[in-house]
Amino acid sequence: MAASGFEGFEKRLELHFSGDDPVIGMGGLRHVDFDSIEEVLHAVQCTVVSAAGNQYFDSYVLSESSLFVYPTKIIIKTCGTTELLKSIRPFIHYACEIGLIITECRYTRGNYIFPKAQPYPHTNFKEEIIYLQDQLPNHLCYRKASVMPSKFTSHSWHVFSASCDKFYSLPISNDLYTVEICMTDLDRVLARKFFKHPDTTGKQMTEITGIGDINSNALICDFAFDPCGYSMNGIDGDRYSTIHVTPEDGFSYASYECVGSIYDDRDDIVKVLKKVVQVFRPGTMSVSITCTNSSEIWSRIVKAVEPLGMKRRSCTVDEFPAAGTVVFQTFTSTRK
Ligand SMILES: C[S@+](CC[C@H](N)C(=O)[O-])C[C@H]1O[C@@H](n2cnc3c(N)ncnc32)[C@H](O)[C@@H]1O
């Protein structure tokens, strides 16, 4: 842990692969053995604290955030002073061993609270992009990096995407969108619930904080850190969700991420976001939506959180190869 405090803001990497149908039908990337996964995580500087899976994907709660492995897709999110980008080469290598080639790479992150504590290649965005570009094979030739600003220097959204296809490499997933929420300055009373008493379990934290009610259909794998901190992965059919909490005063942070479909009931994401805001009552919050299909999801976010005293302060939109449209919005609480 950095001397200054724990860095809650995660780095997030999403890698897509393709290959012959038989390879994918047999589970694709889910056939990479656990020793190999541990080796990749060793390079990143984190470990698995719990694992679960269903017929669609494998879910790992990590010492620093989460990993999800689908037959042709990997999502890995790590916080603290981890070296996430060091996972790219080994993931590509293990995928190649089972006959899969990379078709798309997305990297996103917010603003580090303690940027000086970050090790290479995470020292700054320029350095991260130079490193990323060098790790990726030439066939991912459509590339773009951008920092999406907000009104606050503490919240901007760093995005890089690379693809072998100018548009979407996965047409079947075009209805899906990803929601990434970063919250700072958590309500102090609520944040205290993420401090552990000697016998507190992750399950108890999930219940007493209301996290268990965000999606009551999801199977939740939760973990309570000592003396404080919490992580959970939710598994609901082929969809994941994940929450990570750094409750320490002065650098409190929580993140929420999930996937949705533009064909879902319009109110689903509204209900989820309301519950997330009520669990943490953040002073400042950013919501980033990534969607290949132009949609109005971003406006539902505003409708969900403004009645809870969160005022929208900025909205930035940009387009990225394969990832599609990214809408980045920031909100502050009117409670102070
Ligand atoms: C891993 S969790 C959640 C990380 C997530 N990115 C976040 O900040 O929302 C981080 C919290 O757990 C605490 N913690 C306690 N032991 C830890 C450990 N061995 N590794 C990582 N975090 C630990 C940290 O101080 C922090 O409050």
Image (cartoon, helix red, strand yellow):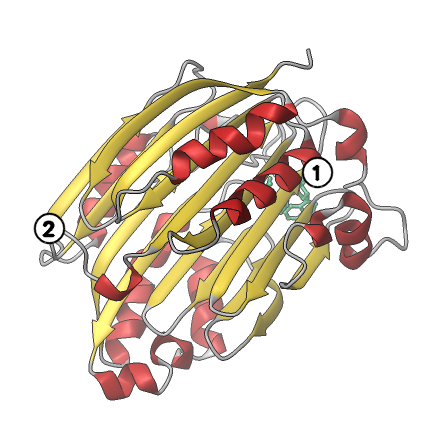
- Residue name at image x 29 percent, y 49 percent: 106
- Gap in angstroms between the C-alphas marked 2 and 1: 39 Å
- Residue name at image x 55 percent, y 33 percent: 304
Q: Position of residue 305 (x, y in %)?
A: 57, 29
**Amino acid residing under circle 2:** Lys
Q: Are marks 2 and 1 in contact (CB under 8 Å)?
A: no
Q: In screen coordinates, is 182 left or right of 247?
A: left
Q: Which residue is mark 2?
A: 166
Q: Position of residue 248 (x, y in %)?
A: 71, 31
Dividing the picture into quadrants, the one containing residue 51 is: bottom right
**Amino acid residing under circle 1:** Val
Upstream in sequence: badge 2 or badge 1: 2
Q: Secondary structure at mark 1?
A: helix
Q: Which residue is mark 1?
A: 279
Quarter of the image with the N terminus in it? top right
Quadrant containing ligand 1: top right
- Residue name at image x 23 percent, y 57 percent: 104
230 and 276: which is toward the camera? 276
Give the crowd class for mark 1: few <14, some 14-19, many >=20 residues within 10 Å: some
- Residue name at image x 76 percent, y 56 percent: 202
Q: Is residue 79 visible?
A: no
Quarter of the image with the C terminus in it? top right
Q: Position of residue 136 (x, y in %)?
A: 19, 54
Does 160 sit above or below residue 240? above
Q: Secondary structure at mark 2?
A: loop
Q: Is mark 2 within 8 Å of ligand 1?
A: no
Dividing the picture into quadrants, the one containing residue 90 is: bottom left
